[in-house]
Amino acid sequence: MTILIIGGNRFVGKLLAESLLKLNQEVTVFNRKGTGPEGCLIIKGDRNNLEDLEQINFSHFDCVVDMCLYNPGQFKLIEPFLNIKIPYIFISSGAAYKDPDVWPIDENNELLGMEAYGNYGVEKAEVEKLISNSNLKDYKILRPTYIVGEGNHNPRLGHYIKCLQNKETIHIAGNGENLISLVFAEDVVHLILLMITSDKPWHDLEDYTVCNNEFLTVNSLINIIANELGIKEMTIKHESSEAILPPNNYGIFTNDKVKVSYDIEFKTLKESLPSYIEWYNKNN
């Protein structure tokens, strides 16, 4: 198969490209830096520039995975190039959902954008609505929660590891009892690979919430990391404006739909934390 990844030069996009190459797929990445894993075909360009998009022969590809589409203008620019019958996978976000009155959140919840994430969530929701109203015949929309794991250029877990190991104050918004949900990058990639390479037919137009099976408070997240590191004493400042995570609930999601559709299981924090800590300390 021939796959185009828009992005593909860091974190989940890079891991996806590397995984596809291991399966002997032909992978092209398109990004502003003009970089990607060895073995990829690379097109350097800015998706916000029409002339750069014109470099891409979209009809050549069997699937397009869009890792870095953030606002409606970007979709409107690329939409005329997309073959309406070629599978298109858009990486949205759990932040695209409306702040709910009732939990848990599933795919039937309204898309409006969660207040804590500002324009990011609002614009992801607007992009989704444009996609659903487009002429595309085969698309998947993935709404991951907080993605963590090796290679993360915004290492949330790494931030807490650093603070604990260096005996720095850990800043927490609110009282730290808000619920959050994680999903490891390798599980997101595994899901995309199933969508691209399996013989399972595409089910028309689908959207999926992507998260693991556990709900954690921020306090419990930090305690789990501290226990894995063997650290018993820490300094925590609650109600802090310097916290890296907002104080809202961003964890009461259900992943039933995606697990049923693709028979996929997701790793827990405790299962993946030892290897992540080892990776983080090597690449600090």
Image: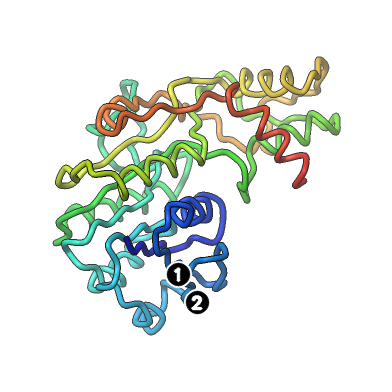
Compare residues 31 and 102 and report the one nearer the observer: 31
Circle number at residue 115: none
Which badge, 1 or 2, comes first in the chain's sequence?
A: 1
Hey, what amino acid is under mark 2?
Lys
Q: Tell me the residue at 36%/62% (across/down).
A: 3
Q: Residue at image x 30%, y 38%? A: 208
Q: Is residue 272 visible?
A: yes
**Quarter of the view holding residue 64:** bottom left
Residue displayed at 43% across by 22% down: 213
Outermost residue, front direction?
A: 24
Answer yes or no: is residue 70 visible: no
Front residue of this view, candidates 69 and 67 = 67
Identify the element where label 1 is drawn: strand
Instruction: Please tell me whether mark 2 sits on a helix, a strand or a loop.
Output: strand
Residue with the mark numbered 2: 44
Structural crowding at the residue carrying mark 1, measured as other residues with C-alpha within 10 Å and reported as few (<14), some (14–19) or many (≥20): many
Q: Residue at x 60, y 24 (%)?
A: 218
Q: Residues within 10 Å of mark 2 (few under 14, many from 20)?
A: some
Horizontal relation, residue 95 to residue 233: left or right: left
| Coordinates of residue 267 in the picture (x, y in percent) | 50, 27
As drawn, which residue projects farthest toward the bottom? Answer: 51
Residue 120, above or below 35: above
Q: Which residue is mark 1?
A: 30
Residue 89 image point, x, y percent: 31, 53
Percent coordinates x, y for residue 67 in the rendering: 42, 56
